[in-house]
Amino acid sequence: MILGPFIAHHREIDPETFPGFPYTGYCFQVAEGDDLLEIPIYYDEEQYFPGRKEYSDFFLNVEDVPFSFYYSPGYHLKHLGAGETLIRFEPVFIGLCHHFSVNPIESLQLLRDAASSLKINSTPLHREPLLPAKGLLHPRVEQLGFVLNKPYSYERILQIDLNFRIRKLDDGKDLEIRAYQWQVRPTADGKLGKLGKLAFRRPNLEESYHLDDLFLHALMAEGITPKNLLTPAGESALIANYEWTKLARMTNAEAKKERLSLIAKHPELWDDLGSLADLLISHELYSPNTSRSQIIKFLPRQISKARKSY
């Protein structure tokens, strides 16, 4: 089986085949023996952000795809009437890579080829990459084109995004797509904490329509695990961006003890749960994401325990 050029620009198709979805001039092209498979790629003219082009803005005719693929009917399909149905780019791309047993690393390059040919210029990212851009990840991971995003803190969790550089834009900047996302809970002693086994789950491309599974498949094929993904410098850079709070500096046991101690010191508020909840919030003993009403629900049991020590 030969791939290439994977994205071809020579197939002649009536541009009015699907109103509102003009033919891009490109198609997937796969040669297998003497057979040549070509799947035309169409563009959604009424995408949500005019002028922006993401992978999900491109479609293929379901009838042109001769292999099975996994998809979400409510999101990936576009029913145009008269029995005509288009499907978004991602599930077909993953299905093609799985069906033709494309090398995991080669699949990343094919994704880049598609981005360049289709002039993709936008991805759903909202945060800037970490600086420095090098030395944070396993050398092989950086060599492949992965980079860390600035993490996002909430409650006691640090959310980490791993991005993949898919192409250079006209202004010289790298366009990145989120490759994978996972969460860690920094420890009270100021360390990053374990990524855990769930950070990397072995993907089943036969039942996947998420590009992150394709990225994870490639990383695991290169022997990358949660233990060797980050360098010491990478761990330090991530933890340096964590928003430490009073609660985050405590273990669970310490936080429970501190709450009970404060409740025990204010018996005059035991019958005024709202004021008691406000007191706990003012002492930063609950996460900002824990609502006042949730705290009030917890209080009767805590007051019962506090009475015993009062």
Image (cartoon, helix red, strand yellow):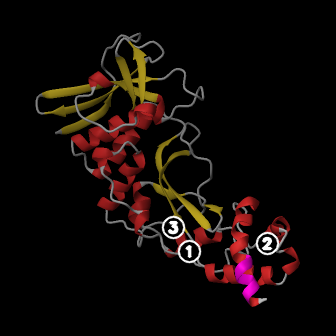
| Disc 3 and disc 2 in contact, CB within 8 angstroms | no
> Compared with residue 197, is residue 91 higher up or lower down, i.e. above or below?
above
The residue where tag 3 is placed is 136
Magenta span: predominant SS is helix
- Is 277 rendered above or below residue 81? below
| Alpha-carbon span between mark 1 and mark 3 | 14 Å
Instruction: Tell me if residue 6 comes above or below residue 152 in the rendering.
Output: above
User: Residue 56: image x %, image y %?
Assistant: 46, 34
Q: Nearer the viewer, mark 3 or mark 2?
A: 2
Measuring from the top left, give residue 308's x and y in whole percent: 73, 88
* Amino acid tagged 2: Leu
State the residue position of label 2. Answer: 280
**Sequence-first disc among 1 and 2:** 1
Please name whichever residue, 17 or 106, is drawn nearer the observer in this view of the structure.
17
Magenta region: which residues?
Answer: 303-308
Residue 292 image label? none
Q: Nearer the viewer, residue 291 or 233?
A: 291
Foreground mark, 1 or 2, reads: 2
Location of residue 245 by image quarter: bottom right
**How many residues crowd around disc 3 within 10 Å: few (fewer than 14), some, or many (20 or more)?**
many
Kindly indicate the quadrant of the structure image that contains residue 63. top left
- Residue appearing at x 11%, y 28% in the figure: 34
Q: Could you give the CA–CA distance between mark 3 and mark 2, rounded to whole angstroms? A: 38 Å
The mark that comes first in sequence, 3 or 2, is 3
Quadrant location of the N terminus in the rendered image: top left
Q: Residue furthest right?
A: 268
How far, Cα to Cα, is label 1 from label 2? 27 Å
Residue highlighted by disc 1: 192
Q: Give the class, few, some or many, for how many residues have Cα within 10 Å of label 2's Cα (few <14, many ≥20).
A: some
| Place of residue 287 in the rendered image (x, y in percent of width and height, measured from the top left) | 70, 66
